[in-house]
Amino acid sequence: MATPPLRSQHVTDSCPPYIKQKLTDKRKARRRWQITRTPEAKQTYNKHAKELKHLLHTHKNTGMQQYLENLTPHKDTNYSLWKTTRKLEPQHHIPPLILQNNTSARTDKQKATTFAHHLSTVFRPFPSQATTEEGIMQELRSPYQMAPPLQKTYISEVKNIIQYNTNPTKAPGYDLLTGTVLKELSQKGICALTQIYNAILRLEYFPRYWKIGQIIMIAKPGKDPTEVTYRPISLLPLLSKILEKNTVTTPDTPPNSKTTNTRSSVWISASTWNHRTNAV
């Protein structure tokens, strides 16, 4: 089969000459400042850069204005108006929150108070099974014969979880640490993180700041605007999720990975983990 001939691509240059001249002046001024490093050259370069930015902004707005004025719903312009509006994404209107006095919540404090009241009425804790304080103290003093000591973690395990079991596109917690940031950790950083995890397992104390979740309310579309119809999601710190993956189950090591996971699987229920950590 013969190779099809390449089609020539004609690139239309819509940049006017005065913008090209200003761009040339800016590049010359930048080159002069890089060589001399004088305040006068820096001031001249900043002046040309500011003028070029203003010209580009004006040229873009003018071109957009002309494009919108030429849109028509007729056949002579190939129905350009309908084709342009079809590409626009629909904007979902989020209704304001309605307070108890039938007024809308406008400030952030009013919105937070309304959400807190709604969540406190919807999500209630389970009733406690303990009846007396003496029973609680006796349960705390009892030896943990059925709970084996937590095994320490290794650098290869933490590295595998960060590399293969951490989604870089997940939303971070309140500390703003994402999977992309953790994937860029050096070997020294992973060693320090492993030491922190081993200290937590040795002391059987889970940091309280890693239990703090950032609650984000997402509006449900198509619901009654007079009611609080929002779906809450809780964003926990990523470091606590990595420790949970490493403690509750053995991370799955990819077949192409050079490091192998020799640590046996440790299964601990949530009640046992909370019981052990809160008893310290």
Image: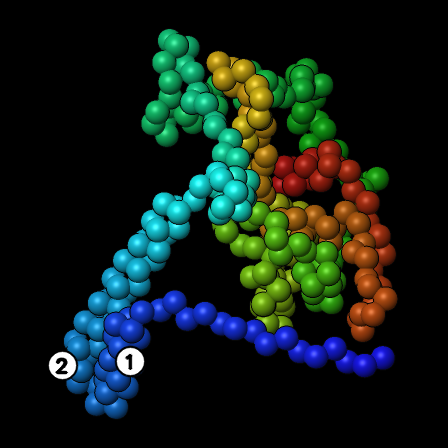
Which residue is labeled 1 in the image? 24
Which residue is labeled 2 in the image? 40
Mark 2 in CB contact with mark 1 (< 8 angstroms) = no
Q: Judge whether residue 85 can be spotted in this image.
A: no
Horizontal placement of 85 versus 255: left or right? left
Kind of residue sitting beneath label 2: Glu
Q: Position of residue 29 (x, y in %)?
A: 23, 82
Kind of residue sitting beneath label 1: Thr
- In the foreground, 267 or 238: 238
Q: How many marks?
A: 2
Horizontal placement of 183 versus 4: left or right? left
Q: Tell me which residue sits at (83%, 70%) in the image.
A: 256
Q: Position of residue 46 (x, y in %)?
A: 21, 72
Tell me the quarter of the image containing the N terminus: bottom right
- In the foreground, 105 or 131: 105
Q: Position of residue 109 (x, y in %)?
A: 36, 27
Q: Tell me which residue sits at (47%, 27%) in the image.
A: 94
Q: Nearer the viewer, mark 2 or mark 1?
A: 1
Q: Tell me which residue sits at (39%, 67%) in the image.
A: 14
